[in-house]
């Protein structure tokens, strides 16, 4: 089976969050299942020179973008047995960063069309194009409209994965013909609420649709989580599948992680993890004292549940717990937590930025790891926290609900209702167990041994691919 991942990012080349982490890790896991998995990406100017020197030029060709004909250069690189293709067009991709430009709609329209044009130039035709998020959502649409009649594309299947339904690729109807090159007779494929919606087009046109956790597959059909797309998702629920993502346990391994103060595993954390905790306290200006450190690695956005923490934080700190927060985002949240760190000096420490090495220091040095999210499609941080023995405290939503369980044989602490009191109570339940040394040690050991690698998810993806291949075109 040949599968081509189409994505706007993939670790280690381009990664701004969970999407990039997932693409690279899942591809390697699928290769282990004898699935020939390749990845196709934009060639952003942000690529590190180390990788750029390894690129091999393949060919170049012209890509139609409505009435325009745009150059596309094809490069490739093989890493850990996975072939990566990079599509070069300096007009669209020679910029600082990946997203947030005025012409993102056109940039990823070009990318989607270029992916399909690239297939003509591959020596091994894919059976499935697996498209990820709105930046690749036009691939199933273009395949249906302009390529299905061509021999190389006749049996090609498409799967579209929703990583975050909040970002759908919405644009005014005026881009339909002049940018997308789609006639008004086909407007219905991408139209939703009177505008162009890339994600809606993919859900309509792809053979199957997946999300990154089973709970999220159900939640996005609810108005609370669906960001306006829920009525249409309910109509297409028969083609939606939910598969919980995993993490790369070799990359996130406290026994070999050179970024942390001391290396440890499930048998040695009792002696070594306190060294990491002391280092974390120094890095975040927290006092040396009895009691747990709660860590957070977070984007400062409203759906991360920060408004709950704002209302509960003083009670949590008064209860003897400390906070080490690493993140960036909304300036209003950054301002609040900066002021909190000054007001509760020694009890709360904050560092701003996307700092992967420091993030692993937070995981290693924290006793607990807090994720009070309003919505969380999958969440990988709670799985990484388990790996490092930082016991998660999470709200029961999306992938958090599917991966963290409270109880005698559980791996963390959870709360359901979206309110500050329940968040506070979950933290104090965790504190109660922490104060019982024997019970806490057993919980940490159980958490570190919990297995959320890619073995099971890759098996479920294989089943979904087989389902798509057996469906009529």
Image (spheres, rainbow, N blue to C red):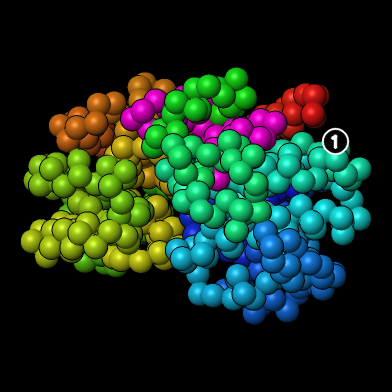
- Asked whether, in this view, residue 426 is left or right of residue 314, the answer is right
Q: For residue 216: magenta?
A: yes
Residue sitting at 50 percent across and 69 percent down?
97
Give whichever of 215, 238 is nearer the camera.
Answer: 238
In the rendered picture of this protein, how many numbered marks are placed on residues?
1
Residue sitting at 36 percent across and 28 percent down?
223
- Asked whether, in this view, residue 407 is left or right of residue 207, the answer is left
Badge 1 crowding class, 10 Å Cα cut-off, few under 14, some 14 to 19, many 20 or more, is some
Residue 115 lies, in percent from the top left, at: 73, 55
- Asked whether, in this view, residue 271 is left or right of residue 457, the answer is left
Quadrant including the N terminus: top right
Residue 371 visible, this orientation: yes
Residue 361 lies, in percent from the top left, at: 40, 60
Residue 116 lies, in percent from the top left, at: 76, 52
364 shown above or below 376: below
Residue named by callout 1: 155
Quadrant including the C terminus: top right
Q: For residue 366: magenta?
A: no
Span colored in magenta: 198-225
Give whichever of 245, 95 is nearer the camera.
Answer: 95
- Asked whether, in this view, residue 81 is left or right of residue 89, the answer is right
443 shown above or below 110: above
Give whichever of 192, 265 is nearer the camera.
Answer: 192
Residue 251 visible, this orientation: no
Residue sitting at 49 percent across and 22 percent down?
234
240 shown above or below 91: above
User: Tag 1's secondary structure?
Assistant: loop
Residue 78 lies, in percent from the top left, at: 78, 62
Residue sitting at 41 percent across and 65 percent down?
355
Choose top left, top right, bottom left or bottom right for residue 414: top left
């Amino acid at each position: 089976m040949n599968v081509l991942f189409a994505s706007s990012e993939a670790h280690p080349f381009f990664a701004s969050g969970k999407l990039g982490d997932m693409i690279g890790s899942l591809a390697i896991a699928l290769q282990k299942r004898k699935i020939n998995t390749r990845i196709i990406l934009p060639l952003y100017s942000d690529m590190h020179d180390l990788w750029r020197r390894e690129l091999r030029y393949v060919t170049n060709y012209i890509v139609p973008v409505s009435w325009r004909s745009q150059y596309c250069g094809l490069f490739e690189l093989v890493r850990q047995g996975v072939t990566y293709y990079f599509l070069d067009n300096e007009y669209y991709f020679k910029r600082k960063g990946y997203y947030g430009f005025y012409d993102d709609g056109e940039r990823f329209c070009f990318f989607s069309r270029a992916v399909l044009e690239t297939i003509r130039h591959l020596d091994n035709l894919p059976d499935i194009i697996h498209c990820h998020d709105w930046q690749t959502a036009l691939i199933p649409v273009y395949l249906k409209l302009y390529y299905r009649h061509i021999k190389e594309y006749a049996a090609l299947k498409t799967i579209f994965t929703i990583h975050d339904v909040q970002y759908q690729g919405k644009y005014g109807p005026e881009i339909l013909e002049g940018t997308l090159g789609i006639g008004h007779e086909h407007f219905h494929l991408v139209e939703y609420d009177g505008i162009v919606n890339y994600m809606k087009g993919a859900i309509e046109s792809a053979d199957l649709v997946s999300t990154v956790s089973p709970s999220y597959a159900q939640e996005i059909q609810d108005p609370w989580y669906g960001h306006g797309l829920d009525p249409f998702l309910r109509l297409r629920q028969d083609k939606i599948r939910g598969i919980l993502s995993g993490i790369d346990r070799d990359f996130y391994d406290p026994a070999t992680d050179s970024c942390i103060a001391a290396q440890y595993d499930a048998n040695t954390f009792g002696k070594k993890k306190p060294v990491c905790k002391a280092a974390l306290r120094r890095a975040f200006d927290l006092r040396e004292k009895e009691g747990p450190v709660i860590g957070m690695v977070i984007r400062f956005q409203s759906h991360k549940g920060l408004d709950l923490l704002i209302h509960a934080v003083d009670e949590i700190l008064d209860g003897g717990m400390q906070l080490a927060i690493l993140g960036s985002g909304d300036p209003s949240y950054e301002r609040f937590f900066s002021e909190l760190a000054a007001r509760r000096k020694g009890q709360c420490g904050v560092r701003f930025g996307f700092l992967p090495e420091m993030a692993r220091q937070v995981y290693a040095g924290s006793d607990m790891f807090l994720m009070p999210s309003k919505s969380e499609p999958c969440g990988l941080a709670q799985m990484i926290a388990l790996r490092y023995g930082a016991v998660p405290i999470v709200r029961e939503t999306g992938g958090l609900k599917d991966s963290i369980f409270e109880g005698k044989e559980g791996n963390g602490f959870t709360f359901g209702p979206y309110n500050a009191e329940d968040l506070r109570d979950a933290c104090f339940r965790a504190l109660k167990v922490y104060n019982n040394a024997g019970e806490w040690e057993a919980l940490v050991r159980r958490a570190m041994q919990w297995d959320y690698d890619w073995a099971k998810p890759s098996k479920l993806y294989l089943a979904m691919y087989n389902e798509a291949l057996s469906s009529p075109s």
